[in-house]
Image (spheres, rainbow, N blue to C red):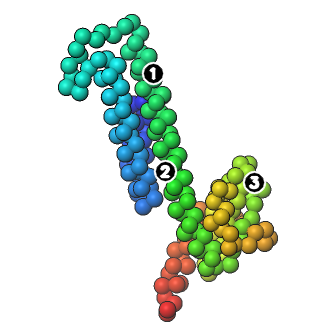
Amino acid sequence: MGIGERAEGLELRLRRASDKSAENLRREIERELAAVLEARDSEWRSGLGIDEYGDPGSRRLQPGQLDAWLRLDEDTATQHAGEAEIEAKNRAYEERNRVVALLAALFPSSLERDPAEPLDEWSWVVLIELPAGQVSWHFNADLLPLFDHVPRHAGRNWDGHTTEQKYERVRQTIEKLRRTPR
């Protein structure tokens, strides 16, 4: 897959972003994509002996040189875009998990291991009993310190809820809390 196709894929993902976390990810990808494209253009101009005004000067291409630069550019752009995307996704997960840790402090909860999860670092799951029912989130073991206040291996079992049911329970809990006098 070429850099153009990758850029189109990123642009499509950006158009689909709708919530705050996705909007932050969208901005991060846009900045990184702009930086990658600027670096590519700068390398091309430099490699071709062209200044920023388009003047080629006296430098001439050697056979195969342009193909080598294009391959290098594509690899560099892919690496930078991939690293930025991973970093932005990790930041979004950490932000989400800070809010989940707050929920775990407010409602009965426990940390359990998901035996079905094949990746050891993602096998942790926080199970929270909201007034409207159980909700759960998997998280990376690197974020365990966010959940130091939550009991581990308390024997809580996942009730089989889907993602849609989870967020419906969150919505119902918000409605219940909104009607509760403070």
**For the point 41% across and 49% down, which residue is it?**
28
Disc 3 marks a residue whose amino acid type is: Ala
* Badge 2 or badge 3: first in the primary sequence: 2
Q: Position of residue 82 (x, y in %)?
A: 50, 39
Vertical placement of residue 27 versus 73, above or below? below
Q: Which residue is mark 2?
A: 88
Numbered label attached to residue 116: 3
Q: Position of residue 32 (x, y in %)?
A: 40, 42
Q: Position of residue 40 (x, y in %)?
A: 36, 29
Asked if residue 145 shows in the view, the reply is: yes
Disc 1 marks a residue whose amino acid type is: Arg
Q: Who is closer to the viewer here, 114 or 151?
A: 151
Q: Residues within 10 Å of mark 3 (few under 14, many from 20)?
A: few
Residue at the front extreme?
58
Asked if residue 150 lies left or right of residue 73, the reply is right
Q: Label 3, secondary structure: give it.
A: loop
Q: Label 2, secondary structure: give it.
A: helix
**For the point 24% across and 10% down, which residue is it?**
58
Disc 2 marks a residue whose amino acid type is: Ala
Asked if residue 2 shows in the view, the reply is: no
Numbered label attached to residue 71: 1
